[in-house]
Image (cartoon, helix red, strand yellow):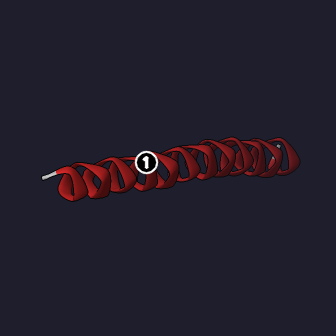
Amino acid sequence: MQGRTQMTNAGNALLWTVLYFALSFGAIFVVWFADRIRSNLLGKQ
């Protein structure tokens, strides 16, 4: 039982780590993409 709990905790830690990395990467990508679109629109105008 205890081994299972430790595996679950390790799995949760890994899941949260991956989730935080994904959210951070997503936020950076959104900001970069929005800035690129804004630059393109301003450049065309």
Q: For this rendering, which residue is in front, 10 or 32?
A: 10
Q: For this rendering, which residue is in front, 22 or 43?
A: 22
* Residue 18 placement (x, y as % from top left): 48, 55
Residue 32 appears left or right of 2 = right
Residue 25 appears left or right of 44 = left
Quarter location, residue 14? bottom left
Residue at image position (34%, 56%) is: 11
Q: How crowded is mark 1: few (under 14 residues within 10 Å), some or many (20 or more)?
A: few
- Please, what secondary structure does the residue beneath circle 1 have? helix
Q: For this rendering, which residue is in front, 17 or 35?
A: 17
Quarter location, residue 42? top right
For the image, the number of numbered tags is 1
Q: For this rendering, which residue is in front, 18 or 30?
A: 18
Looking at the image, which residue sits at the far front?
A: 2
Residue at image position (26%, 52%) is: 8
Looking at the image, which residue sits at the far left?
A: 1
Residue at image position (76%, 43%) is: 35
Name the residue beneath numbered marker 1.
Answer: 13
* Residue 26 placement (x, y as % from top left): 56, 49
* Amino acid under disc 1: Ala
Residue at image position (82%, 43%) is: 45
Residue 4 appears left or right of 9 = left
Residue 18 appears left or right of 39 = left
